[in-house]
Image (cartoon, grey):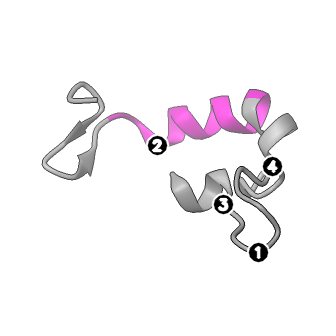
Amino acid sequence: MEKYIVDGKVKGDPQKGMVFYQTICYRCHGLDGNKINFGNEREPKYLGGAA
């Protein structure tokens, strides 16, 4: 993870990442990251909140 996160700050280009997410990842995860619940109904856990 050191390659991507240093001292709590994310490295990389958010615009470039957004292009990938909006063209590939959103299909399963949803545009807001809340399409798949990795938790359960009582304690939902979505990609958008975990990321």
Residue appearing at x 71%, y 53% in the figure: 33
Q: Earlier in the sequence, mark 2 or mark 3?
A: 2
* Predominant SS along the magenta part: helix
Label 4 sits on residue: 36
Label 3 sits on residue: 45
SS assignment at label 3:
loop
- Tags 3 and 1 in contact by the CB under 8 Å rule? no
* Distance Cα–Cα, label 4 vs label 1: 14 Å
Number of other residues with Cα within 10 Å of mark 1, as a class: few under 14, some 14 to 19, many 20 or more: few
Number of other residues with Cα within 10 Å of mark 4, as a class: few under 14, some 14 to 19, many 20 or more: some
Residue type at mark 1 is Arg
Label 2 sits on residue: 14
Placement of 45 over or under 36, stated as above or below: below
SS assignment at label 2:
helix
Residue type at mark 2 is Pro
Q: Earlier in the sequence, mark 1 or mark 2?
A: 2
Q: Quadrant of residue 20?
A: top right
* Distance Cα–Cα, label 2 vs label 3: 23 Å
| In magenta segment, residue 14 | yes
Residue type at mark 3 is Lys
Residue appearing at x 51%, y 51% in the figure: 51
- Tags 2 and 3 in contact by the CB under 8 Å rule? no
- Tags 4 and 1 in contact by the CB under 8 Å rule? no
- Tags 1 and 2 in contact by the CB under 8 Å rule? no
Label 1 sits on residue: 42
Instruction: Report the magenta residues as a range.
Output: 12-24
